[in-house]
Image: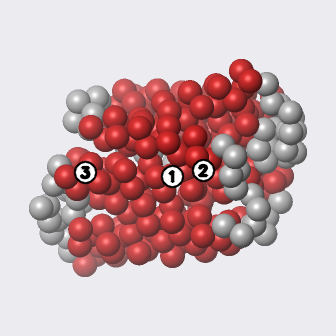
Amino acid sequence: MTFVTLSFFALAVLILVFFLTSVVGVVTGSNSLIAVPVMFQFGIDPRVAVATNMFGLTFMAVGGTLPFLRTGLLDKKRLPSLAALTVVGSVLGASLVGIISSRSMSLIVSASMIGMTIFTLLRRRGGMEKRETLSAAAQYTAFALTFLLGIYGGLFSGGYVTMLTAVFVAFLGMTFTEAIANTKLVNVFSSFVATLIFMWQGLVDYKLGLILGVTMFVAAFAGAKIVTKMNDLWLRRIFFTTVLLLALKTIFDLFFK
């Protein structure tokens, strides 16, 4: 069992960072790209930081899902398949921690985030209107990408929900509100399965994880409540602006630090 010793100041900073990133992360995802590096700054072992953050993300995913349960936004037809693919991918990803370089994975995801953002922006009404008619190729692509992203989500999670949101908008024809709602539920499965693997490996700091988990649950619940009252145009603007900034920041950190 892993324990991390932190000063009161360090713990207060982490709580604040995790709260703020979780509120915004309901819309944008990618909160791990900020939160996990902050954990590194306080001397927390990288593997423990990733595992403990994943533990907290499970709470965040549940908190972010609850406000959407009675909204009719969840795709009950496709969610079972998407969840199953995510579970398998997350198991593979969590098992690869320490084997695959997080640096190379972060670079791949950052480049993919930019690519998906440009792709979705080219579809002027992408995320603004639900597409009822979808080609088989588009749906199979969405399933394949969900599986691949599940691997990355189990490995690190930074940018995982962001990419998944873009995939659901681009290939499953969802509005941004629908995509945000569905990715939150899928992320419950991803985070939970990966957390079980990390717990088995003895990498989770339960004391810190519970503190951050409760913080993330409350923040995500509040953030999701706000999302249900926003229109898709504003969600699109917030999503793309934040995603591009985070992707560029990650690439900058990889090459210039």
As helix, strand or loop, the secondary structure at mark 3 comes to helix
Q: Would you say 34 lies left or right of 231 here?
A: left
Q: Name the residue under label 2.
A: 183
Q: Mark 1 points at which residue?
A: 187
Q: Type of residue at label 3?
A: Phe
At horizontal 35% and vertical 36% (from top left) the residue drawn is: 93
Q: Which tag, 3 or 1, sits closer to the chain's start?
A: 1
Q: Indicate the quadrant where residue 54 lies.
A: bottom left
Q: Mark 3 points at which residue?
A: 198
Q: Type of residue at label 1?
A: Asn
Figure label count: 3
Residue 129 visible in the snapshot: yes
As helix, strand or loop, the secondary structure at mark 1 comes to helix
- On residue 116, the disc is none
Q: Would you say 27 lies left or right of 192 here?
A: right
Q: Indicate the quadrant where residue 167 lies.
A: top right
**Residues tagged 2 and 1 counted as in contact (Cβ below 8 A):** yes
Q: Which tag, 2 or 3, sits closer to the chain's start?
A: 2
Furthest-bottom residue in this view? 8
The crowding category of the residue bearing disc 2, from other C-alpha atoms within 10 Å (few below 14, some 14 to 19, many at least 20), is: many
The crowding category of the residue bearing disc 1, from other C-alpha atoms within 10 Å (few below 14, some 14 to 19, many at least 20), is: many
Above or below: residue 28 compared with residue 255:
below
Residue sitting nearer the eye, 222 or 201? 201
User: Whole-Å distance between the Cαs marked 2 and 1?
Assistant: 6 Å
Residue 48 visible in the snapshot: no
Above or below: residue 60 compared with residue 164:
below
Residue sitting nearer the eye, 117 or 186? 186
